Image: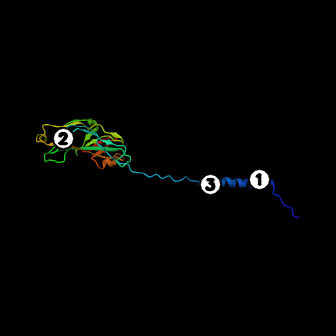
């Protein structure tokens, strides 16, 4: 009968060490190869939306401001913006402003008490530019505190009604080249608008 040879203790220790090394290496390789599930980040564009909160009782227009609401009408978040305002007076036959007449109208036909004009600058294009960035949820300082028709104005003497349209525009504040490329303004070092002649 043949004698079975039993491996020596040194061989068993070496085999055990080899199994241990392979196990550790396999776990390390598995750890290095693991990965997370992908996270999808879909970017949505913000919107620029401006509103005009004011009071008007058909004889006095007051507290004219511009607001950058938190969200636009479609629910998307608003972005910081620069805003400007045009004031367009016209004479009309009716009190609701639907029948304009050929009588020339100007802001001098109104008695206007202006608001905090340090915050506004008028451009050569006739727009009133709010100097600061208007962040979502913020409102400008008051542009017009009160405006009433000058009773000596020619249109008023002719029995016409004054209609003043307040038209506001907004444009994204960042990058500054967006506003500088569209409006006749420059963005100063502090972020305030400066009108370019």
Which label number is shown at residue 190? none
Mark 1 sits on what residue? 13
Q: Residues within 10 Å of mark 2 (few under 14, many from 20)?
A: some
- Which residue lies most toward the bottom here? 1
Please tell me how many numbered marks the rendered image carries. Answer: 3
> Residue at 65% of width from left, 55% of height from top?
26
In the displayed structure image, the side of residue 16 where residue 74 appears, left or right: left
Could you tell me residue 158's position as x and y percent? 11, 42
Sequence-earlier tag: 1 or 3: 1
Q: From the viewer's perspective, is 36 left or right of 61? A: right
Please tell me the numbered disc located at residue 30: 3
Asked if marks 2 and 3 touch (Cβ < 8 Å), the reply is no
Q: Which of 122 and 97 is in front in this view?
A: 97
Residue 53, position in %: x, y? 29, 40
Residue 67: give x, y in percent of width and height: 32, 41
**3D distance between C-alphas at marks 1 and 3:** 26 Å
- Under tag 3, what secondary structure? helix
Element type at mark 1: helix
Camera-side residue: 117 or 188?
117
Count residues near mark 3 (Cα–Cα under 10 Å), then give few for <14, some for 14-19, many for 20+.
Answer: few
Crowding at dot 1, Cα within 10 Å, few <14 / some 14-19 / many 20+, comes out as few
> Between marks 2 and 3, how big is the CA–CA gap?
77 Å
The image quadrant that residue 89 belongs to is top left
Question: Which circle marks residue 107 in the picture?
Answer: 2
């Amino acid at each position: 009968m043949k004698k079975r040879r039993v491996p020596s203790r040194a061989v068993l220790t070496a085999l055990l060490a080899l199994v241990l090394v392979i196990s550790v290496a396999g776990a390390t390789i598995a750890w290095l190869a693991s990965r997370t599930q992908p996270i999808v980040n879909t970017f949505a564009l913000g919107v620029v939306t401006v509103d005009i909160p004011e009071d008007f009782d058909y004889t006095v227009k007051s507290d004219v401001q511009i607001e950058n609401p938190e969200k636009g009408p479609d629910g998307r978040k608003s972005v910081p913006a620069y805003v400007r305002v045009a004031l367009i007076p016209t004479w009309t036959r009716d009190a609701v402003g639907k029948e304009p007449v050929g009588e020339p109208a100007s802001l001098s036909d109104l008695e206007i008490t202006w608001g905090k004009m340090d915050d506004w600058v008028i451009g050569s294009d006739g727009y009133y530019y709010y100097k600061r960035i208007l962040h979502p949820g913020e409102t400008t300082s008051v542009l017009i505190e009160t405006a009433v028709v000058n009773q000596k104005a020619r249109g008023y003497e002719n029995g016409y009604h004054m209609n003043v349209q307040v038209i506001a525009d907004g444009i994204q504040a960042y990058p500054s080249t967006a506003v500088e490329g569209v409006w006749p303004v420059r963005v100063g070092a502090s972020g305030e608008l400066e009108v370019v002649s």
